[in-house]
Amino acid sequence: MRMFFCAAAFSLIWLSNLALAADTKPNVIVILTDDQGWGDLSLHGNTNLKTPHIDSLAKDGAQFEHYYVCSVCAPTRAEFLTGRYHPRTGVRGVSTGLERLNLDEITIADTFHAAGYKTASIGKWHNGSQWPYHPCARGFDEYYGFTSGHWGEYFNPPLERASRDCKTEIVRGKGFIADDFTNETLRFIEANKAQPFFCYLTYNTPHSPFSVPDEDWNRHKDNPVKMRGAEGEKEDLQVTRSALALCENLDRNIGRILDKLTELKLAENTIVVYFHDNGPNSVRWNGGMKGKKGSVDEGGVRSPLFVRWPAKIKPGTKIGGIAGAIDLLPTLVRLTEVPLISKKPLDGIDLSNMLLGDQLQTSAFAERAIFSHQNGKVSLRTVSQRLDDRGLLFNMVKDHGQTKDFSRDLPEAAQKLRSMIDIWRRETLPAEKRDTRPYPVGYAEFPVTYLPARDGNSTGTIKRTGPAPNCSYFTNWTSKDDRITWDIDVHTAGKYEIELFYTVSEADAGATIEASFAGKTISGTVKPAWDPPLNEKDDRVPRKGESYQKEFRPLSLGVIELSAQHGTLVLRATEIPGKQVMDLRMIRMTLK
């Protein structure tokens, strides 16, 4: 009798929640983590760590058993934002402008903003920095974070705060970066609790560099790593411990968000979506799958996808088949009954019926294929098979480690999938391999433009400080013959203040710098001396790709009159009294 009563009570509560959701538009929080593998969750069997709050999203909502993203960061974001395969959207890579989302793409944030939602992007954006590639031009009312692919400072980091009303400023975050992004999310939720909101929270961990708060590191620094990666001899255990600690930090922060929703009585009618942007960024336990970040094999592109909406999605819902990042836009639009405003054909399909309890798979879902692309390599995943980028065929039901090739045993099946990839390549991949888009400068609606070192080019002895351009800066500027250039398109003719973000030692201060564009020049002197130390104290593993960072100081060269045209912005030194000119992090151009 008691069991019957509990079941009946649950049914009544669930039905009342359905009525509640029918009256008000649901809020949406999309949480995307960076370089976290499918195996980095205790829910998936990893006993090296504990992730109870993330696991609860699957237990209290729905989990997709086979969900696929891209093998690197920016392409996955583009597919989520547009519902379209990333090569169609202009996103070809992760840096030097290749990460930019074409301006004619309509994003999921555009869609929710048009429907009256308050929208925010918090964290790592990675689909373009300058307006109109900036998140505040892509449907978001607010932005807080960094727009490049990865960041070099995880404690009290320099970040951008911006809004649609032309305001942007560089600020210092408070504390550890993931904690800070969570604090900003809690603020946004609190400020907009009385209206529907769409929050896109993109954590940048456990991406390297492996800077980890003491609270999380101390739990793992001396622990044996019991579950190892498939290529155990290649596993760096300190990297694994760092990643595990960062994943537990993420779990704690996601728990804070879920607690805030409960506190504000918003949990029932808030859709919470959780997934990763690619496979793990190191060799570590990942369920025995082949591949990691950068690979188009199963381990490089498989991600969890959890969707919790207590008002309408039954706890413990499991969805088979295959799904991908391209499906989230059409699915969330349908769940929230928000009008779809994109006129371009979507590659994703609406999976809302399965989330809401209809487990009958449509033929489009049951027979579909999902394509994974990275640097010209393409693999294809069906419900039961994967054709890898070499044309080898694997049975993914029995062999998710991709150890036995069946292409010779099943030649017709392999050829069919190869033909599908050939067609996809012709229809999807751009014919022009070079990206010729300039960096836009000077829009009246957003008059401040940042041109980081990542987007520039250099000649002579000048070099970037690290092989990963995203958080690098220019150094070793020793000759008057050297140049730093940016390919820019000035949108609005007018007066522009040009500022350099620099460091220089006392012995080298005093170089004369000239900036020129389309026959106009402006010059200034690199002083006073500003030579802060590198921040090298927070890492648990020595850096290999990212540059160590320091505090850069702005130096105004003054105001210059520029015409509206495409051209090359050139920096050169006309006098060098010391050994080098300066280290340069970025330029800021402000339309007056």
Image (cartoon, rainbow, N blue to C red):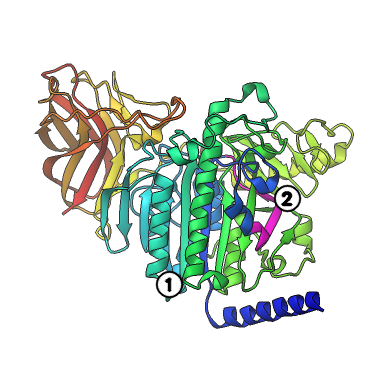
Question: As drawn, is 42 to the left or to the right of 33?
Answer: right
Question: As drawn, is 148 to the left or to the right of 320?
Answer: left
Q: Helix, strand, or loop for circle 2?
A: loop
Question: As drawn, is 463 to the left or to the right of 433?
Answer: left
Taking the spot 11% from the left edge, 31% from the top edge, the residue there is: 527
Which of the pair 286/416 is nearer the observer? 286
Going from N to C along the chain, the mark reached first, 1 or 2, is 1
Residue placed under numbered mark 2 in the picture: 369
Residue 419 % position (x, y): 75, 42
Query: Residue 174, relative to residue 362: is it above or below?
Result: above
Question: As drawn, is 262 to the left or to the right of 384?
Answer: left
Range of residues picked out in magenta: 58-71
Residue 586 % position (x, y): 27, 38
Q: Residues within 10 Å of mark 1 (few under 14, many from 20)?
A: some
Q: Amino acid at mark 1?
A: Lys
Taking the spot 19% from the left edge, 20% from the top edge, the residue there is: 580
Q: Helix, strand, or loop for circle 1?
A: loop
Rendered-image quadrant of the N terminus: bottom right
Residue 297 % position (x, y): 68, 36
Which one is in front in this view, the residue at disc 1 or the one at disc 2?
A: 1
Q: Residue furthest right?
A: 409
Q: Which mark is residue 435?
A: none
Taking the spot 43% from the left edge, 54% from the top edge, the residue there is: 182
Residue placed under numbered mark 1 in the picture: 193
Asked whether 60 falls inside the magenta stretch, the response is yes
Query: Residue 355, relative to residue 368: is it above or below?
Result: below
Residue 334 % position (x, y): 61, 70
